Amino acid sequence: MDEQFYIRQLKSGEHFVQGNPIAGQMANFVYLVGDSVKKECLVVDPAWDVKGIVDCARADDMTIVGVLCTHFHPDHVGGDLFGHHVEGLAELMALNPCKVHCHPGDIPYVKMMTGLSDGDFSPTRGGDVVSAGDVEITCLHTPGHTPGSQCFRCRKALIAGDTLFLEGCGRTDLPGGDPEEMRRTITQRLATLPDDLILYPGHHYSRSRHADMGHVKKTNHIFR
């Protein structure tokens, strides 16, 4: 990674929202990604403890200028999770107002989960570019887990949300899931990406927290 590129991987129950057994069990990753020179970053999937996430950015002298939303599930955007309230985008808009970059396929569900309005969003489709300072992040539409699931490619990093894990991929039996779309996403959209990209998943579901795509393609059974 170059010196200008900033990326911070934050784990629920460890870097923020300590002491919450549900958050600890879910093991969500939240990411800060942006420009270490201009001190601007985007936050990927802020949930569980918004103030804790913002404090992590401020501790690095970074300003959050936008949100990248991988998909609409409440452990990534906030809302009701099996009767438990999860902080998320609504709390972030109150504490650190900014635009939410989300695929149109998931925006109606995010609005339902969080109460956000159309004016809070800056819709992004596959191939769109969002910037933090002089660092550009390319949005990849990777449906399957949800209709509007997105991965974000920036320099040598691929932030994949729940589309792709180091071991396995996101579920397709939840509302909005589509096994055939997930098959296309894995075989046609992700399998063709360069081996030297570093995969950063949406959950800590394996021993490692990230790995290069070459390794993932060789060891993750979904590519076989």
Image: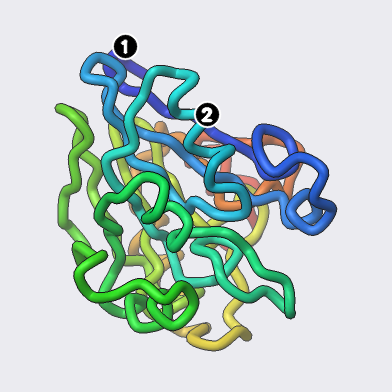
| Farthest-out residue, front | 94
Q: Is residue 8 left or right of residue 108?
A: right
Q: Is residue 200 above or below residue 170?
A: above
Q: Is residue 125 visible?
A: no
Q: Is residue 62 above or below residue 22?
A: above
Kindly report the distance in space between the C-alpha atoms of the residues bearing marks 2 and 1.
Answer: 19 Å
What is the secondary structure assignment of the residue under circle 2?
helix
Q: Is residue 223 left or right of residue 15?
A: left
Q: Foreground mark, 2 or 1?
A: 2
Give the x, y percent position of residue 206: 74, 45
Q: Is residue 82 above or below residue 152?
A: below
What is the secondary structure assignment of the residue under circle 1?
loop
| Residue where numbered disc 1 is placed | 3
- Residue occupying image coordinates x 34% and y 37%: 64
Q: Is residue 168 left or right of residue 202?
A: right
Give the x, y percent position of residue 203: 64, 51
Point out the tag, 2 or 1, that comes first from the N-terminus: 1
